[in-house]
Amino acid sequence: MTDTQWDAASARPGSIYWKRNLAVSLIGSFTTIVAMTLLLPFLPLYVEELGVSDHAAIVQWSGIAYGATFFAAALVAPLWGRLGDIYGRKLMLVRASLGMTVAISLMGMAGNVWQLVALRLFVGLAGGYSSGSMVLVATQTPKDRSAWALGVLSSGIMAGNLVGPLLGGALPPVIGIRGSFLAAGGMIFLAFLATAFLIKEEKSPARKQAAKASGGWKSIADKRPVIAMLVTGMLLMFANMSIEPIITVYVAQLVPVEAQVTIISGIVMSGAALGSILSASWLGKLADRIGHWPVIAGALAVAGLLLIPQAFVTSSWQLIILRFMMGMALGGLLPCITAVIRHSVPDSAAGSILGLSISSQYIGQVAGPILGGFVGGHIGMRAVFLGTSLLLLAGAAYAWMVRPMRKHQAPAEDDADDL
């Protein structure tokens, strides 16, 4: 489909459903992210409950179990994106929500750590709800409201990252760890019902034919911005995930009362998400004014510097404040990354290329927990913070060096109208 055809599609009567689609996608993304992050505060405790007793082994298995989901998702995200381009984005959301309902509910029935890892792999293979929602909203919303709609959806996703760890810290003392998984599965089932019966996707035979004929990656005229954003997305997720799976163990060294470890761990993890929610709109406005690239490089640099004092905190409140500040620095990164990619590709290939973007982010989410767990278990917790800091600072330098010069940015800005 040409840009002119897509602009016409945006104004057709079928687009009257875009507000409903946004509301359902927002609720569905929020609940699925809550369910995905709910296990973070108690994951090491659940691994221990499943029979792992050695301290280093608990840390490593926690990293493997958490990273397994993103390893599997990294393999299939481009496939789901491609199929969404051809057969419809709603179908991908229905598939993802139903698959996650089954897998996360079964996690509460795991008998050993291997079964837990296998179910985490299945969640990754079947999931992808929030990324699919981004593509659906971007392509079904009228172009003059799409930026606002994507901002609202991004806030819902970040809110899920905020609420999930909090619930994960509060639910196990009330209903138990296994009951927490069943509650999460029930939430996603409600999202599945809402998605199946309420979302109305505008059918576009022209887009379907264009998607079948498109070469995906080959259809991109200038691949340099996309490659840079793939690397940046990977670094962003690595920075978050290398720390979060070991935070419970790290907090246990700072908190004298054992009963407070899970709830404080949830607050620490949610601090970064809260900072992101508060800063996202401001950083988005700043990016609109000065460009996406300076914001991306600056955010990576500030976050890298904030990781250094996190390695030397002496109390939990210091860690909470620093994680909050780091979240504020990183709040606008994902919308900026998505915007750069979306403005650089034709609509018929949007799902495929954004699928590659999700894969690169999942690679960071896989490598982060595994390397963070290994380094934390064998070298020390401080080494995880300092090593991640070096990677973010290197990423900031890379983004600054490869940024397009102002004269090359005009086409991308013009393409923004196509979103």
Image (cartoon, rainbow, N blue to C red):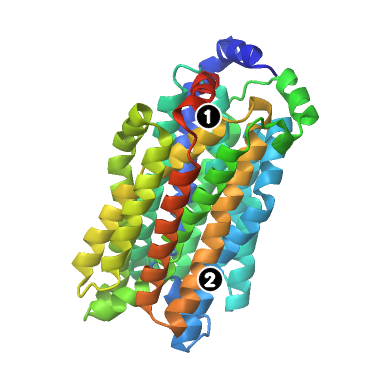
Q: Which residue is mark 1?
A: 137
What number of labels is visible?
2
Pinpoint residue 243: horizontal percent, then vertical percent: 40, 66
Instruction: State if disc 2 and disc 1 touch (CB < 8 Å).
Output: no
Dot 2 crowding, Cα within 10 Å, few <14, some 14–19, many 20+: many
Residue 353: quarter of image: top right
Residue 377 appears in view: yes
Residue 55: quarter of image: bottom left
The kind of residue tagged 2 is: Ile
Q: Secondary structure at mark 1?
A: helix
Sequence-first disc among 1 and 2: 1
From this view, report whether residue 112 is shown above or below residue 96.
below
**Residue at 47 percent of width and 24 percent of height:** 146
**Residue at 41 percent of width and 64 percent of height:** 390
Residue 27 appears in view: no
In this view, the residue in front, 116 or 64, is 64
Residue 203: quarter of image: top right
In this view, the residue in front, 178 or 66, is 66
Pinpoint residue 344: horizontal percent, then vertical percent: 58, 30
From this view, report whether residue 101 is shown above or below residue 281.
below
Q: Which residue is mark 2?
A: 370
The kind of residue tagged 1 is: Val
From this view, report whether residue 378 is shown above or below residue 419.
below
Instruction: Answer with left or right where residue 331 lies relative to residue 349.
Output: left
Q: Nearer the viewer, mark 1 or mark 2?
A: 2
Instruction: Answer with left or right where residue 175 lies relative to residue 50.
Output: left
Dot 1 crowding, Cα within 10 Å, few <14, some 14–19, many 20+: many
Q: Secondary structure at mark 2?
A: helix
Pinpoint residue 268: horizontal percent, then vertical percent: 29, 62
Q: CA distance from mark 1 to mark 2?
A: 33 Å
